[in-house]
Image (tube, rainbow, N blue to C red):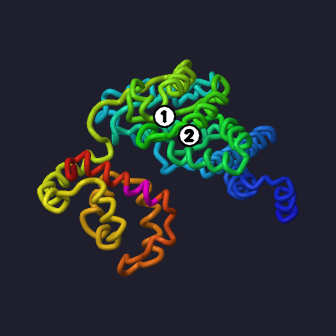
Amino acid sequence: MIEELNKKLDLLELTKVKEILPEYVHEHAKENLPLTNQLNYLLGEEVKSKDERAAEGIIKASNFPFRKTLDDYDFSFQPSVSETQMRELANLGFVERQENIVFIGNPGVGKTHLAVALGIEAAKHRNSVYFITCHNLMLKLNKAQKENRLDKQLQHLAQYKVLIIDEIGYLPVDHQGSNLFFQLIAKRYMNKSTIVTTNMPFSRWGEVFSDNTLASAVLDRLLHYSHIIRITGNSYRIKDKIAETDSRTNKYKEWYQVTSEQLKSYLIENIASYFKYEIYEVIDTYQLPAFNKVFDIIKNNNKDNYSYTLKDIDYVLFDKLISDIVQRLAERNIIN
């Protein structure tokens, strides 16, 4: 009897019911519950399980750099961020109304964390979500244009219920890239929700996009129906490491009295020895995403001595890593 029932459950793909049925029967055999109550409970668990699996699939496909929720965010450390407002946004009314969210603030204040948290919440409710850095978005759009499939790529990116574009302003965008970025924002305008993070005030977006007119057009559509979250304060990522790293600043200055370009050249020529010491601490302190990808390759290829060549490293990714390191060292006045 049980074997035949399991076959039917498999046929109907009621995997959760099949999993919990034996224990359920054992616990409730003597309660004489109405059949409708039993079916309602079992099928409710099945629906819940399917929703969770679907949400997990969306989250995995969303390209999030990490998984963090609002519960993981230290609102007491960043009082400029309203927890009430963030909890309200997590109810996803902005998705239903096709509104945008703009997080603006200095590096390390938690902009990406909050953007990802809202994205994960949207994915849990089975909304399509995609996360991408502005730099990688430009690479994707430029490649599509060169391969004569730009319209298809724009349409693909325009269909996501929530598109998260991270790090606008960290790297400049040329005129062609700015035009492509505008086309994407225009397609999503009043149709889908876009979340962006930026370290640049809106008054300087003309510098980011190399064109004041295009920057104004982007901002006009991005900000028309939007929630602007301005975050001030110290770096959220390094709050527990500031005291630890400050004690070593003098050693950093002694080792790194070089210009940014000299440091880039040195890293490229001496990457193995450089990663093993002071650069490790800079990477750990700021949790640079590009480093994680590059270092994974280092560990996989050379687990003992970390010596390797750049032949297996994507050049654009490696260049982004170098730029990130230089920027962070400059922020701490380690280089000039």
Q: Are marks 1 and 2 in contact (CB under 8 Å)?
A: yes
Percent position of residue 100, x then y? 55, 26
Which element type, helix, strand or loop, lies under badge 2? helix
Provide the major secondary structure of the magenta segment: helix
* Residue 141 in which image quadrant: top right
Query: Which mark, by number, is residue 246?
Result: none
- To which residue does mark 1 refer? 209
Q: What's the residue at 75%, 57% (across, down)?
A: 18
Percent position of residue 275, x then y? 32, 67
Residue 70 visible here? no
Q: Amino acid at mark 2?
A: Gly
Q: What's the residue at 55%, 41% (across, down)?
A: 120
Is residue 102 shown above or below 332? above
- Residue 20 in the magenta stretch? The answer is no
Q: Which residues are magenta?
A: 318-322
Q: How many circles with numbers are drawn on the protein?
A: 2
- To which residue does mark 2 refer? 177
First in residue order: circle 1 vs circle 2: 2
Q: What's the residue at 25%, 68% (across, down)?
A: 277
* Residue 159 in which image quadrant: top right
Q: Is residue 297 left or right of residue 236?
A: right
Residue 200 visible here? yes
